[in-house]
Image: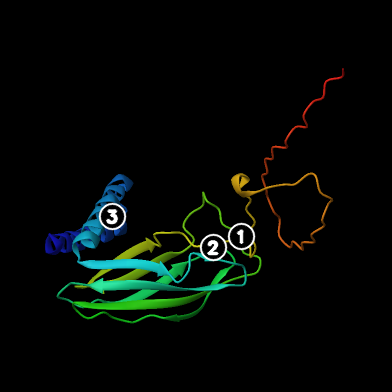
Amino acid sequence: MYAEAVQSLREVRSAQHIADRQNMDTDLLERLDVKEAQLQRVIDESGEVEVTVTSSAYEVTRDGQVEVTIDIDNENPRPLVQLNADLHLPDGWQVTDQDVPRSVRANQKVEATFTVAIDEDAEFFDAYGEPAIIGDLSYRLRGNVVEHQVSTEETVAVLPKVGLELSPEATILNTQTGNDEIELEVRQPITMKMAMKRPFASSQQKA
């Protein structure tokens, strides 16, 4: 299947080039684009190249950093050449160091590593947002350019440096004693939900 897909992809790209040069019907170009995407998926699935992206930590704070690794497992009998790897990151995140191999031999596993720094004004974690880190990998295999875009299985979340959580079942508030003051310095907004049940004083009947 792999060899046929590669040959078909080569033919489709050749047809795209001819159609584009001769200003052919845009409907034909769109169909060729769809076919190209389908064949690219077949090559990715049958090319025996596994790509995974992992992070050294999945909870970080502002001014922190993580080490991100793109693992490439080439089980093909052919090498992967002209290897390029990069990361798609949110605003306020930046790659400060990286080590990316230029090729992968047949039946070899390699890794591309990145040091990612989080700025002091980076956005906090959004549970409904896109994955924070997406690895972008491309290489040539048997003369064809193959691309992968893979995110970490668990998103990397920027959280405040201090978190507070009260469990109603484990919290006791004594309302019979004097108030004791506790000073806290809070540098980030805090959202807190509390529910307390206060015992009612027993009623007394007048004679």
- Residue 187, by quadrant, is bottom right
Label 2 or label 1, whichever lies nearer to me, is: 1
Residue lying at 40% horizontally and 73% vertically, measured from the top left: 69
Check disc 3 and give the amino acid type: Ala
Label 3 or label 2, whichever lies nearer to me, is: 2
Viewer-side residue, 4 vs 137 = 137
The answer to whether the residues at label 2 and label 1 have Cβ atoms under 8 Å apart is yes
> Picture coordinates of residue 17 (x, y %)?
27, 61
Check disc 2 and give the amino acid type: Pro
Image quadrant in which the C terminus is located:
top right
Pick whichever of labels 1 and 3 is earlier in the sequence: 3
Q: Say which residue label 2 marks.
A: 90
Quick check: 140 above or below 171? below
**Secondary structure type for disc 2:** loop
> Picture coordinates of residue 138 (x, y %)?
33, 70
- Residue 114, by quadrant, is bottom left
Residue lying at 56% horizontally and 57% vertically, measured from the top left: 125
Viewer-side residue, 110 vs 31 = 110
**Secondary structure type for disc 3:** helix
Q: How crowded is mark 3: few (under 14 residues within 10 Å), some or many (20 or more)?
A: few
Image quadrant in which the N terminus is located:
bottom left
Q: Which mark is residue 123?
A: 1
The answer to whether the residues at label 3 and label 2 have Cβ atoms under 8 Å apart is no
Lateral position of residue 30 relative to residue 206, left or right: left
Q: Which residue lies furthest to the right in this view?
A: 207
Pick whichever of labels 2 and 1 is earlier in the sequence: 2
Label 1 or label 3, whichever lies nearer to me, is: 1
Q: Residue 37 carries which label?
A: 3
**Secondary structure type for disc 1:** loop
Lateral position of residue 168 relative to residue 54, left or right: right
Q: Residue 85 carries which label?
A: none
